[in-house]
Image (cartoon, helix red, strand yellow):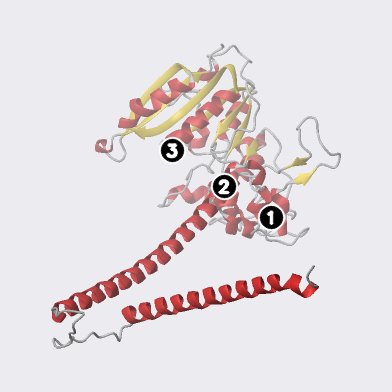
Amino acid sequence: MGSADDDHLPKKQTHKSINDQTKYKLKLLVLIILTNLLTIYIFTSPSLNLHPISKYTTNSLFPAFDSTSLLQELNATKKELETSRSQIIVLHQQLKSTNQLVTELLAQLNLLNQSINRTTDSSLLNFNDLLDDLSNEAKLGLGPHKLPLGLSPRSGTDEVYPSVGGGCLMYKEDLAQYMTYNVGNECPVDDVFAQRLMLKGCEPLPIRRCHPKAPCGYVEPTPLPKSLWSTPPDTSIIWDPYTCKNYSCLIDRRKFPGFYDCKDCFDLQFREKTRWQFDNGGLDFGMDQVLSTRRQGTIRIGLDIGGGVGTFAARMKERNVTIVTTSMNLDGPFNNFIASRGLISMHVGVSQRLPFFQNTLDIVHSMHILSNWIPDTMLELIMYDIYRVLRPGGLFWLDHFFCLGTQLNATYVPMLERVGFKKLRWNAGMKLDRGIDKNEWYFSALLEKPMS
Protein backbone atom coordinates (compact mmCIF):
# COMPACT_ATOMS: atom_id res chain seq x y z
CA MET A 1 0.00 0.00 0.00
CA GLY A 2 1.24 3.48 -0.79
CA SER A 3 1.61 6.37 1.56
CA ALA A 4 -1.02 9.04 2.19
CA ASP A 5 1.02 11.55 0.19
CA ASP A 6 0.93 9.26 -2.77
CA ASP A 7 -2.85 9.03 -2.47
CA HIS A 8 -3.28 12.86 -2.79
CA LEU A 9 -0.79 13.32 -5.61
CA PRO A 10 -3.21 12.68 -8.53
CA LYS A 11 -5.78 15.04 -7.04
CA LYS A 12 -3.23 17.88 -6.75
CA GLN A 13 -2.12 17.32 -10.33
CA THR A 14 -5.76 17.37 -11.44
CA HIS A 15 -6.44 20.68 -9.66
CA LYS A 16 -3.33 22.24 -11.18
CA SER A 17 -4.31 21.09 -14.65
CA ILE A 18 -7.79 22.57 -14.27
CA ASN A 19 -6.39 25.89 -13.03
CA ASP A 20 -3.96 26.09 -15.96
CA GLN A 21 -6.75 25.38 -18.44
CA THR A 22 -8.96 28.06 -16.84
CA LYS A 23 -6.18 30.66 -16.97
CA TYR A 24 -5.50 29.80 -20.60
CA LYS A 25 -9.14 30.17 -21.52
CA LEU A 26 -9.40 33.50 -19.70
CA LYS A 27 -6.32 34.82 -21.49
CA LEU A 28 -7.70 33.67 -24.80
CA LEU A 29 -11.08 35.34 -24.05
CA VAL A 30 -9.40 38.62 -23.07
CA LEU A 31 -7.31 38.53 -26.26
CA ILE A 32 -10.41 37.99 -28.40
CA ILE A 33 -12.24 40.86 -26.68
CA LEU A 34 -9.29 43.21 -27.10
CA THR A 35 -8.97 42.25 -30.76
CA ASN A 36 -12.66 42.95 -31.37
CA LEU A 37 -12.51 46.25 -29.54
CA LEU A 38 -9.48 47.31 -31.57
CA THR A 39 -11.23 46.36 -34.79
CA ILE A 40 -14.35 48.34 -33.82
CA TYR A 41 -12.24 51.35 -32.89
CA ILE A 42 -10.32 51.27 -36.18
CA PHE A 43 -13.44 51.08 -38.39
CA THR A 44 -15.62 53.48 -36.40
CA SER A 45 -13.04 56.12 -35.47
CA PRO A 46 -13.80 59.43 -37.26
CA SER A 47 -10.03 59.99 -37.58
CA LEU A 48 -9.62 56.90 -39.74
CA ASN A 49 -8.13 57.86 -43.11
CA LEU A 50 -7.04 55.12 -45.47
CA HIS A 51 -4.24 56.10 -47.83
CA PRO A 52 -3.55 54.49 -51.15
CA ILE A 53 -1.34 51.39 -50.89
CA SER A 54 1.73 51.54 -52.97
CA LYS A 55 1.56 49.59 -56.13
CA TYR A 56 5.03 48.26 -55.33
CA THR A 57 3.92 46.62 -52.12
CA THR A 58 3.91 43.09 -53.34
CA ASN A 59 5.66 39.92 -52.54
CA SER A 60 5.82 36.47 -53.80
CA LEU A 61 3.00 35.30 -51.62
CA PHE A 62 0.51 38.04 -52.63
CA PRO A 63 0.38 39.00 -56.27
CA ALA A 64 -0.16 42.64 -57.23
CA PHE A 65 -3.76 44.01 -57.03
CA ASP A 66 -5.62 47.31 -57.70
CA SER A 67 -5.12 49.05 -54.33
CA THR A 68 -6.90 52.25 -55.43
CA SER A 69 -10.20 50.46 -56.12
CA LEU A 70 -9.96 48.61 -52.85
CA LEU A 71 -9.33 51.85 -50.97
CA GLN A 72 -12.32 53.54 -52.62
CA GLU A 73 -14.56 50.63 -51.69
CA LEU A 74 -13.30 50.74 -48.10
CA ASN A 75 -13.87 54.51 -47.87
CA ALA A 76 -17.33 54.14 -49.38
CA THR A 77 -18.11 51.43 -46.83
CA LYS A 78 -16.89 53.69 -44.07
CA LYS A 79 -19.15 56.53 -45.24
CA GLU A 80 -22.13 54.18 -45.38
CA LEU A 81 -21.35 53.02 -41.86
CA GLU A 82 -21.11 56.62 -40.64
CA THR A 83 -24.38 57.49 -42.42
CA SER A 84 -26.08 54.47 -40.87
CA ARG A 85 -24.76 55.43 -37.46
CA SER A 86 -26.15 58.99 -37.91
CA GLN A 87 -29.51 57.59 -39.00
CA ILE A 88 -29.54 55.29 -35.98
CA ILE A 89 -28.88 58.29 -33.70
CA VAL A 90 -31.71 60.26 -35.36
CA LEU A 91 -34.06 57.27 -35.12
CA HIS A 92 -33.14 56.88 -31.46
CA GLN A 93 -33.96 60.53 -30.79
CA GLN A 94 -37.26 60.22 -32.65
CA LEU A 95 -38.09 57.05 -30.75
CA LYS A 96 -37.30 58.84 -27.50
CA SER A 97 -39.60 61.76 -28.47
CA THR A 98 -42.34 59.37 -29.55
CA ASN A 99 -42.04 57.55 -26.25
CA GLN A 100 -42.45 60.83 -24.38
CA LEU A 101 -45.53 61.71 -26.47
CA VAL A 102 -47.05 58.29 -25.83
CA THR A 103 -46.37 58.68 -22.10
CA GLU A 104 -48.06 62.11 -22.04
CA LEU A 105 -51.02 60.81 -24.09
CA LEU A 106 -51.52 57.91 -21.69
CA ALA A 107 -51.42 60.34 -18.77
CA GLN A 108 -54.08 62.53 -20.43
CA LEU A 109 -56.24 59.51 -21.20
CA ASN A 110 -55.95 58.43 -17.59
CA LEU A 111 -57.09 61.86 -16.38
CA LEU A 112 -59.98 61.82 -18.86
CA ASN A 113 -61.01 58.36 -17.71
CA GLN A 114 -60.95 59.49 -14.08
CA SER A 115 -63.10 62.52 -15.00
CA ILE A 116 -65.61 60.31 -16.82
CA ASN A 117 -65.74 57.97 -13.86
CA ARG A 118 -66.38 60.88 -11.51
CA THR A 119 -69.18 62.12 -13.77
CA THR A 120 -70.88 58.78 -14.28
CA ASP A 121 -70.45 57.51 -10.74
CA SER A 122 -73.11 59.32 -8.75
CA SER A 123 -71.47 58.22 -5.53
CA LEU A 124 -68.53 60.53 -6.32
CA LEU A 125 -70.69 63.60 -6.90
CA ASN A 126 -70.92 65.78 -3.83
CA PHE A 127 -73.32 68.71 -3.57
CA ASN A 128 -70.94 70.37 -1.12
CA ASP A 129 -68.31 70.55 -3.87
CA LEU A 130 -70.58 72.99 -5.72
CA LEU A 131 -70.59 75.29 -2.69
CA ASP A 132 -66.82 75.49 -2.21
CA ASP A 133 -66.49 79.09 -3.37
CA LEU A 134 -69.39 80.42 -1.28
CA SER A 135 -69.45 82.01 2.15
CA ASN A 136 -70.66 80.09 5.18
CA GLU A 137 -73.89 82.10 5.19
CA ALA A 138 -74.55 81.16 1.56
CA LYS A 139 -73.85 77.51 2.36
CA LEU A 140 -76.37 77.66 5.20
CA GLY A 141 -78.95 79.05 2.78
CA LEU A 142 -78.43 76.22 0.30
CA GLY A 143 -78.04 73.33 2.74
CA PRO A 144 -78.11 70.43 3.30
CA HIS A 145 -79.31 70.27 6.90
CA LYS A 146 -79.52 67.11 8.96
CA LEU A 147 -82.93 66.20 10.36
CA PRO A 148 -82.83 66.24 14.17
CA LEU A 149 -84.82 63.00 14.41
CA GLY A 150 -82.75 61.17 11.83
CA LEU A 151 -84.08 59.29 8.83
CA SER A 152 -87.62 60.33 7.90
CA PRO A 153 -89.82 57.52 6.52
CA ARG A 154 -91.86 60.11 4.64
CA SER A 155 -89.00 61.60 2.67
CA GLY A 156 -86.66 58.61 2.76
CA THR A 157 -83.66 60.70 3.83
CA ASP A 158 -82.04 62.10 6.97
CA GLU A 159 -81.31 65.54 5.51
CA VAL A 160 -83.16 68.35 3.79
CA TYR A 161 -82.16 70.89 1.15
CA PRO A 162 -83.79 74.34 1.09
CA SER A 163 -85.75 75.02 -2.10
CA VAL A 164 -83.37 77.17 -4.14
CA GLY A 165 -83.36 77.75 -7.89
CA GLY A 166 -80.88 75.69 -9.89
CA GLY A 167 -79.64 78.84 -11.62
CA CYS A 168 -78.22 80.15 -8.34
CA LEU A 169 -75.05 78.09 -8.66
CA MET A 170 -74.47 79.49 -12.15
CA TYR A 171 -74.06 82.99 -10.68
CA LYS A 172 -71.94 82.38 -7.61
CA GLU A 173 -70.59 85.92 -7.39
CA ASP A 174 -74.10 87.40 -7.44
CA LEU A 175 -75.26 84.77 -4.96
CA ALA A 176 -72.35 85.57 -2.65
CA GLN A 177 -73.23 89.28 -2.82
CA TYR A 178 -76.89 88.56 -2.05
CA MET A 179 -75.90 86.45 0.97
CA THR A 180 -73.53 89.09 2.40
CA TYR A 181 -75.08 90.85 5.41
CA ASN A 182 -74.91 91.05 9.19
CA VAL A 183 -76.85 88.16 10.69
CA GLY A 184 -79.76 89.35 12.82
CA ASN A 185 -79.51 92.94 11.61
CA GLU A 186 -81.19 94.85 8.79
CA CYS A 187 -80.97 93.34 5.30
CA PRO A 188 -79.42 95.39 2.50
CA VAL A 189 -81.97 97.23 0.36
CA ASP A 190 -81.09 95.22 -2.75
CA ASP A 191 -84.53 94.52 -4.21
CA VAL A 192 -83.48 95.32 -7.77
CA PHE A 193 -80.36 93.17 -7.53
CA ALA A 194 -82.28 90.28 -5.94
CA GLN A 195 -85.00 90.41 -8.59
CA ARG A 196 -82.42 90.42 -11.37
CA LEU A 197 -80.93 87.28 -9.81
CA MET A 198 -84.39 85.71 -9.79
CA LEU A 199 -84.92 86.51 -13.46
CA LYS A 200 -81.64 84.74 -14.25
CA GLY A 201 -83.10 81.53 -12.84
CA CYS A 202 -82.04 81.79 -9.20
CA GLU A 203 -85.61 81.37 -8.03
CA PRO A 204 -86.53 80.90 -5.30
CA LEU A 205 -83.72 82.78 -3.65
CA PRO A 206 -82.04 81.41 -0.51
CA ILE A 207 -83.55 82.44 2.82
CA ARG A 208 -81.59 85.17 4.60
CA ARG A 209 -81.12 85.65 8.36
CA CYS A 210 -81.75 89.38 8.44
CA HIS A 211 -84.69 91.80 8.78
CA PRO A 212 -86.09 93.75 5.83
CA LYS A 213 -86.02 97.49 6.19
CA ALA A 214 -89.31 98.78 7.64
CA PRO A 215 -91.14 101.83 6.24
CA CYS A 216 -90.99 104.98 8.33
CA GLY A 217 -94.36 106.21 9.65
CA TYR A 218 -96.23 103.07 8.58
CA VAL A 219 -100.01 103.31 9.09
CA GLU A 220 -102.73 100.67 9.12
CA PRO A 221 -104.10 99.70 5.67
CA THR A 222 -107.44 100.91 4.32
CA PRO A 223 -110.27 98.48 5.22
CA LEU A 224 -112.04 96.34 2.63
CA PRO A 225 -113.89 96.86 0.32
CA LYS A 226 -112.69 100.47 0.02
CA SER A 227 -109.08 99.33 -0.25
CA LEU A 228 -109.78 97.62 -3.59
CA TRP A 229 -109.88 100.99 -5.38
CA SER A 230 -107.84 103.22 -3.08
CA THR A 231 -104.24 104.37 -3.44
CA PRO A 232 -102.34 103.48 -0.27
CA PRO A 233 -100.31 106.05 1.69
CA ASP A 234 -96.70 106.63 0.60
CA THR A 235 -95.49 105.59 4.06
CA SER A 236 -96.42 101.98 3.33
CA ILE A 237 -93.48 101.57 0.92
CA ILE A 238 -89.68 101.46 0.99
CA TRP A 239 -89.00 103.64 -2.07
CA ASP A 240 -85.22 103.18 -2.25
CA PRO A 241 -85.21 100.67 -5.18
CA TYR A 242 -87.52 102.68 -7.47
CA THR A 243 -87.21 105.68 -9.76
CA CYS A 244 -90.39 107.20 -8.35
CA LYS A 245 -90.39 108.05 -4.66
CA ASN A 246 -94.16 108.33 -4.13
CA TYR A 247 -97.44 107.10 -5.63
CA SER A 248 -98.20 110.46 -7.25
CA CYS A 249 -95.14 109.98 -9.44
CA LEU A 250 -96.27 106.47 -10.40
CA ILE A 251 -99.78 107.64 -11.27
CA ASP A 252 -98.51 110.53 -13.41
CA ARG A 253 -95.99 108.34 -15.23
CA ARG A 254 -98.49 107.55 -17.99
CA LYS A 255 -98.52 111.20 -19.01
CA PHE A 256 -94.82 111.30 -19.88
CA PRO A 257 -92.78 109.67 -22.66
CA GLY A 258 -90.69 106.60 -21.99
CA PHE A 259 -91.28 102.88 -21.59
CA TYR A 260 -92.36 101.43 -18.28
CA ASP A 261 -93.81 98.05 -17.46
CA CYS A 262 -97.57 98.48 -16.96
CA LYS A 263 -97.13 102.23 -17.38
CA ASP A 264 -100.64 103.31 -16.35
CA CYS A 265 -101.47 100.50 -13.91
CA PHE A 266 -101.14 102.53 -10.72
CA ASP A 267 -103.86 104.98 -11.81
CA LEU A 268 -106.91 103.07 -10.57
CA GLN A 269 -109.25 105.71 -11.99
CA PHE A 270 -107.95 105.34 -15.56
CA ARG A 271 -108.02 102.18 -17.71
CA GLU A 272 -107.83 99.87 -14.70
CA LYS A 273 -111.33 100.98 -13.72
CA THR A 274 -112.96 99.47 -16.81
CA ARG A 275 -110.85 96.38 -17.48
CA TRP A 276 -112.93 93.18 -18.08
CA GLN A 277 -116.16 95.06 -17.41
CA PHE A 278 -117.35 94.82 -21.02
CA ASP A 279 -117.17 92.23 -23.79
CA ASN A 280 -116.58 93.67 -27.27
CA GLY A 281 -116.97 90.34 -29.07
CA GLY A 282 -113.31 90.46 -30.09
CA LEU A 283 -110.09 90.39 -28.10
CA ASP A 284 -111.64 91.91 -24.96
CA PHE A 285 -113.57 89.23 -23.08
CA GLY A 286 -115.97 90.33 -20.35
CA MET A 287 -115.49 88.76 -16.92
CA ASP A 288 -119.19 88.01 -16.47
CA GLN A 289 -119.35 86.36 -19.90
CA VAL A 290 -116.42 84.11 -19.01
CA LEU A 291 -117.88 83.14 -15.63
CA SER A 292 -121.21 82.36 -17.27
CA THR A 293 -119.64 79.42 -19.12
CA ARG A 294 -119.71 77.56 -15.79
CA ARG A 295 -122.48 76.87 -13.32
CA GLN A 296 -122.82 79.78 -10.89
CA GLY A 297 -120.59 79.51 -7.86
CA THR A 298 -118.28 76.81 -9.29
CA ILE A 299 -115.51 79.30 -10.14
CA ARG A 300 -114.20 80.01 -6.63
CA ILE A 301 -110.40 80.13 -6.61
CA GLY A 302 -107.79 80.86 -9.22
CA LEU A 303 -104.51 82.41 -10.31
CA ASP A 304 -103.57 85.49 -12.34
CA ILE A 305 -100.07 85.14 -13.85
CA GLY A 306 -98.26 88.46 -14.21
CA GLY A 307 -101.25 90.37 -12.89
CA GLY A 308 -99.72 93.88 -12.65
CA VAL A 309 -101.34 95.70 -9.73
CA GLY A 310 -104.00 93.05 -9.08
CA THR A 311 -107.04 94.56 -10.80
CA PHE A 312 -108.17 91.20 -12.20
CA ALA A 313 -108.14 89.80 -8.65
CA ALA A 314 -110.02 92.89 -7.39
CA ARG A 315 -112.80 92.44 -9.95
CA MET A 316 -113.00 88.72 -9.18
CA LYS A 317 -113.17 89.46 -5.46
CA GLU A 318 -116.24 91.58 -6.12
CA ARG A 319 -117.74 88.38 -7.58
CA ASN A 320 -116.73 86.24 -4.57
CA VAL A 321 -113.83 84.59 -6.39
CA THR A 322 -110.42 84.45 -4.67
CA ILE A 323 -107.50 85.05 -6.99
CA VAL A 324 -103.77 84.83 -6.20
CA THR A 325 -101.75 87.31 -8.29
CA THR A 326 -98.12 86.79 -9.30
CA SER A 327 -96.14 89.90 -10.15
CA MET A 328 -92.61 91.29 -10.35
CA ASN A 329 -91.53 94.69 -8.99
CA LEU A 330 -90.21 96.13 -12.26
CA ASP A 331 -89.37 99.70 -11.21
CA GLY A 332 -92.50 99.87 -9.13
CA PRO A 333 -93.86 98.36 -5.88
CA PHE A 334 -96.37 96.06 -7.63
CA ASN A 335 -96.50 93.41 -4.91
CA ASN A 336 -96.90 95.99 -2.14
CA PHE A 337 -99.67 97.69 -4.08
CA ILE A 338 -101.56 94.41 -4.59
CA ALA A 339 -101.33 93.60 -0.87
CA SER A 340 -102.47 97.13 0.08
CA ARG A 341 -105.67 96.48 -1.90
CA GLY A 342 -106.42 93.51 0.37
CA LEU A 343 -105.40 90.93 -2.25
CA ILE A 344 -102.90 88.07 -2.25
CA SER A 345 -99.66 88.67 -4.12
CA MET A 346 -96.79 86.31 -4.92
CA HIS A 347 -93.39 87.60 -5.99
CA VAL A 348 -92.50 84.88 -8.52
CA GLY A 349 -91.49 84.79 -12.16
CA VAL A 350 -93.10 82.87 -14.99
CA SER A 351 -90.39 80.20 -15.13
CA GLN A 352 -91.03 78.83 -11.63
CA ARG A 353 -93.18 75.77 -11.13
CA LEU A 354 -96.58 76.89 -9.88
CA PRO A 355 -96.82 76.35 -6.11
CA PHE A 356 -100.22 74.65 -6.26
CA PHE A 357 -101.23 71.03 -6.13
CA GLN A 358 -102.61 69.35 -9.24
CA ASN A 359 -106.31 69.53 -10.14
CA THR A 360 -107.09 72.29 -7.62
CA LEU A 361 -107.74 75.66 -9.32
CA ASP A 362 -110.97 76.67 -11.03
CA ILE A 363 -109.44 79.33 -13.30
CA VAL A 364 -106.02 80.59 -14.46
CA HIS A 365 -105.73 83.95 -16.24
CA SER A 366 -102.80 85.71 -17.88
CA MET A 367 -102.74 88.97 -19.83
CA HIS A 368 -99.77 90.12 -21.94
CA ILE A 369 -97.11 88.37 -19.84
CA LEU A 370 -97.36 85.04 -21.69
CA SER A 371 -96.23 85.99 -25.19
CA ASN A 372 -93.65 85.21 -27.84
CA TRP A 373 -90.77 86.67 -25.79
CA ILE A 374 -90.68 83.35 -23.90
CA PRO A 375 -88.70 80.52 -25.57
CA ASP A 376 -91.05 78.00 -27.15
CA THR A 377 -89.91 75.05 -25.04
CA MET A 378 -90.23 77.01 -21.79
CA LEU A 379 -93.64 78.33 -22.84
CA GLU A 380 -94.87 74.81 -23.49
CA LEU A 381 -93.63 73.75 -20.04
CA ILE A 382 -95.59 76.67 -18.53
CA MET A 383 -98.72 75.62 -20.45
CA TYR A 384 -98.40 72.07 -19.15
CA ASP A 385 -97.99 73.38 -15.60
CA ILE A 386 -101.15 75.46 -15.96
CA TYR A 387 -102.93 72.35 -17.21
CA ARG A 388 -101.60 70.48 -14.16
CA VAL A 389 -102.98 72.85 -11.52
CA LEU A 390 -106.40 73.31 -13.16
CA ARG A 391 -109.16 70.98 -12.03
CA PRO A 392 -111.06 69.01 -14.69
CA GLY A 393 -113.41 71.48 -16.34
CA GLY A 394 -111.24 74.40 -15.15
CA LEU A 395 -110.75 77.47 -17.36
CA PHE A 396 -107.57 78.91 -18.84
CA TRP A 397 -108.13 82.50 -19.98
CA LEU A 398 -105.26 83.50 -22.26
CA ASP A 399 -105.74 87.25 -22.63
CA HIS A 400 -104.08 89.31 -25.42
CA PHE A 401 -101.26 86.90 -26.31
CA PHE A 402 -98.80 88.75 -28.58
CA CYS A 403 -97.04 87.04 -31.51
CA LEU A 404 -96.19 87.41 -35.18
CA GLY A 405 -98.62 86.26 -37.83
CA THR A 406 -96.18 83.58 -38.95
CA GLN A 407 -96.11 82.13 -35.43
CA LEU A 408 -99.83 82.04 -34.75
CA ASN A 409 -100.85 78.91 -36.64
CA ALA A 410 -97.38 77.41 -37.03
CA THR A 411 -96.31 77.50 -33.36
CA TYR A 412 -98.92 78.45 -30.79
CA VAL A 413 -102.10 76.77 -32.03
CA PRO A 414 -100.32 73.38 -32.30
CA MET A 415 -98.71 73.95 -28.89
CA LEU A 416 -102.05 74.46 -27.13
CA GLU A 417 -103.46 71.42 -28.92
CA ARG A 418 -100.49 69.29 -27.80
CA VAL A 419 -101.02 70.32 -24.20
CA GLY A 420 -104.61 69.13 -24.46
CA PHE A 421 -106.79 72.21 -23.94
CA LYS A 422 -110.25 72.39 -25.50
CA LYS A 423 -111.21 75.67 -27.19
CA LEU A 424 -114.33 77.39 -25.89
CA ARG A 425 -113.64 80.76 -27.48
CA TRP A 426 -110.92 82.11 -29.79
CA ASN A 427 -110.43 85.58 -31.26
CA ALA A 428 -107.44 87.01 -33.11
CA GLY A 429 -106.73 90.53 -34.33
CA MET A 430 -103.86 92.38 -35.96
CA LYS A 431 -101.91 94.92 -33.90
CA LEU A 432 -101.81 98.04 -36.09
CA ASP A 433 -100.12 100.75 -34.02
CA ARG A 434 -96.70 100.03 -35.59
CA GLY A 435 -97.98 99.38 -39.10
CA ILE A 436 -99.50 96.48 -40.98
CA ASP A 437 -96.14 95.47 -42.45
CA LYS A 438 -94.95 94.34 -39.00
CA ASN A 439 -97.47 91.48 -39.12
CA GLU A 440 -98.00 91.67 -35.35
CA TRP A 441 -101.02 89.96 -33.83
CA TYR A 442 -102.91 89.43 -30.59
CA PHE A 443 -105.15 86.51 -29.83
CA SER A 444 -107.39 85.89 -26.83
CA ALA A 445 -108.59 82.40 -25.97
CA LEU A 446 -110.86 80.80 -23.41
CA LEU A 447 -109.70 77.19 -22.99
CA GLU A 448 -110.97 74.31 -20.91
CA LYS A 449 -109.21 71.41 -19.26
CA PRO A 450 -111.28 68.38 -20.34
CA MET A 451 -113.34 66.59 -17.71
CA SER A 452 -111.67 63.29 -18.59
Q: Quadrant of residue 442?
A: top left
Q: Compare residues 187 and 217 and report the one nearer the observer.
A: 187
Res 138 label: 1
Q: Amino acid at mark 3?
A: Pro
Q: Answer few, some or many: residues within 10 Å of disc 1's Cα (few below 14, many 20 plus, some between 14 and 19).
A: many
Q: Amino acid at mark 1?
A: Ala
Q: CA distance from mark 2 to mark 3?
A: 17 Å
Please report whichever mark, 1 or 2, sits nearer to the chain's N-terminal start: 1
Residue 61: x percent and y percent?
A: 21, 80
Q: Are marks 1 and 3 in contact (CB under 8 Å)?
A: no
Res 375 label: 3
Q: Compare residues 447 and 34 and report the one nearer the observer.
A: 34
Q: Tell me the residue that label 2 is attached to.
A: 167
In the image, residue 138 sits, relative to residue 116, either above or below, namely: below
Residue farthest toward the right in the current orientation of the protein: 149
Please report whichever mark, 2 or 3, sits nearer to the chain's N-terminal start: 2
